[in-house]
Image (cartoon, rainbow, N blue to C red):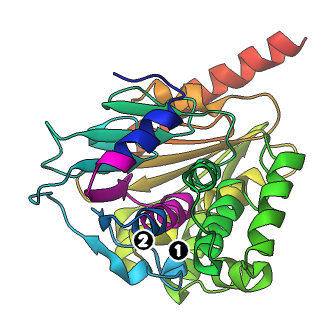
């Protein structure tokens, strides 16, 4: 296993490899998609052969990104590659791709829950997004930051910082954003694509979720059933960001969004404000993420899953009050 901060190992593997595969976690978000695309552009500038794959399709709001159509949706890797680069994965399972065992793996991650499972591991929990790490990789590799690459990286930074709202967003984050704009990222156009291009199905699903909104002091939660997903013709990606409507409530410090899956399991998105570390909540159920934005999947049925996660959230909030006192 490699060191947690091993950018030079990544550069060395890139130098000696010829054919590369780039992928990220299942249900790719803006950081995963933007960073995959930018990473592939770096490799192509260096004269490498590159494929990009994901077990899930690219969400609609990111399909206008340069070269996004080149990301293929597959479930198994059968082609021989010199190097497989996985972004934002704490293990092979997080990619939901089969056929990765025994391959030469590079793991690039910025989550506090990141693990050193690959041949080379570069984990930087200080980075605001994996995109920041990919930008650093581009700088050290000496490649040109094209407007297309800058667009992908800016989109990743914008979305993974919660529109520059999450803790950890500092002067360095804005300096990175400014650099990407100077390299050709059109910030207003990117914001329009990300925030004003949602399908009708997402708005209908939001209505269903808000109709189930509950609040208990500093805790708020809402849910959608599998029937809600079918009725609104919603896709998995339409659930992205719905939890933010609950955490936006004044006085709420922890918000949970529950989505009932078709296999009797429940997917959770957890957000927090202030000192509450929801990554610890997610990790108790095999998930992970950031201090203020995490997720996991647990067994249903939905009412049981809700009570299970709410009990942990209540305990966490109670302990936070005592620690502050």
Q: Residue furthest left?
A: 78
Q: In the picture shown, does residue 41 fall above or below 280?
A: below
State the SS at label 2: helix
Q: Where in the figure is residue 44, as x and y percent of width and height?
A: 40, 69
Span colored in magenta: 15-40
Q: Where in the figure is residue 215, as x and y percent of width and height?
A: 72, 46
Q: Which residue is mark 1?
A: 205
Can the viewer see residue 50?
yes
Residue at 62% across, 37% down: 290
Residue at 18% across, 45% down: 100
Location of residue 81 (image quadrant) = bottom left
Can the viewer see residue 288?
no
Q: Is residue 190 left or right of residue 134?
A: right
Residue contact between numbered discs 1 and 2, judged by CB atoms under 8 Å: yes
Q: Nearer the viewer, residue 223 or 8?
A: 8
- Mark 1 / mark 2, whichever is N-terminal: 1
Q: Is residue 251 left or right of residue 140?
A: right
């Amino acid at each position: 296993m490699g060191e947690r901060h091993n950018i030079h190992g990544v550069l060395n593997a890139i130098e000696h490899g010829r054919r590369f595969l780039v992928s990220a976690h299942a249900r790719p978000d803006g950081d995963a998609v933007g960073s995959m695309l930018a990473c592939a552009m770096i490799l192509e500038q260096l004269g490498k052969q590159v494929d990009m794959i994901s077990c899930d399709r690219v969400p609609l709001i990111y399909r206008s990104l340069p070269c996004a159509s080149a990301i293929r949706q597959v479930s198994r890797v059968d082609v021989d590659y010199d190097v497989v680069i996985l972004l934002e994965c704490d293990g092979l399972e997080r990619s939901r791709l089969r056929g990765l065992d025994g391959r030469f793996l590079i793991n690039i991650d910025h989550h506090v829950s990141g693990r050193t499972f690959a041949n080379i591991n570069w984990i930087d929990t200080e980075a605001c997004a994996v995109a920041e790490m990919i930008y650093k990789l581009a700088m050290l590799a000496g490649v040109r930051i094209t407007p297309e690459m800058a667009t992908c990286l800016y989109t990743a930074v914008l979305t993974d910082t919660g529109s520059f709202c999450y803790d950890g967003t500092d002067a360095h984050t804005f300096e990175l954003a400014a650099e990407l704009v100077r390299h050709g990222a059109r910030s207003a156009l990117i914001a329009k694509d990300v925030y004003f291009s949602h399908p009708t199905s997402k708005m209908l699903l939001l209505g269903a979720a808000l109709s189930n909104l509950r609040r208990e002091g500093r805790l708020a939660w809402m849910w959608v059933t599998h029937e809600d997903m079918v009725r609104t013709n919603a896709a998995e990606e339409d659930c992205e960001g719905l939890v933010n409507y609950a955490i936006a409530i004044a006085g709420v410090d922890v918000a949970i969004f529950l989505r009932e899956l078709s296999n009797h399991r429940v997917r959770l998105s957890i957000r927090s404000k202030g000192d509450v570390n929801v990554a610890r909540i997610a990790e108790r159920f095999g998930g992970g993420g950031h201090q203020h934005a995490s997720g996991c999947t647990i067994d249903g049925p939905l009412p049981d899953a809700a009570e299970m996660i709410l009990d942990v959230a209540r305990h966490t909030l109670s302990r936070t009050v005592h620690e502050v006192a």
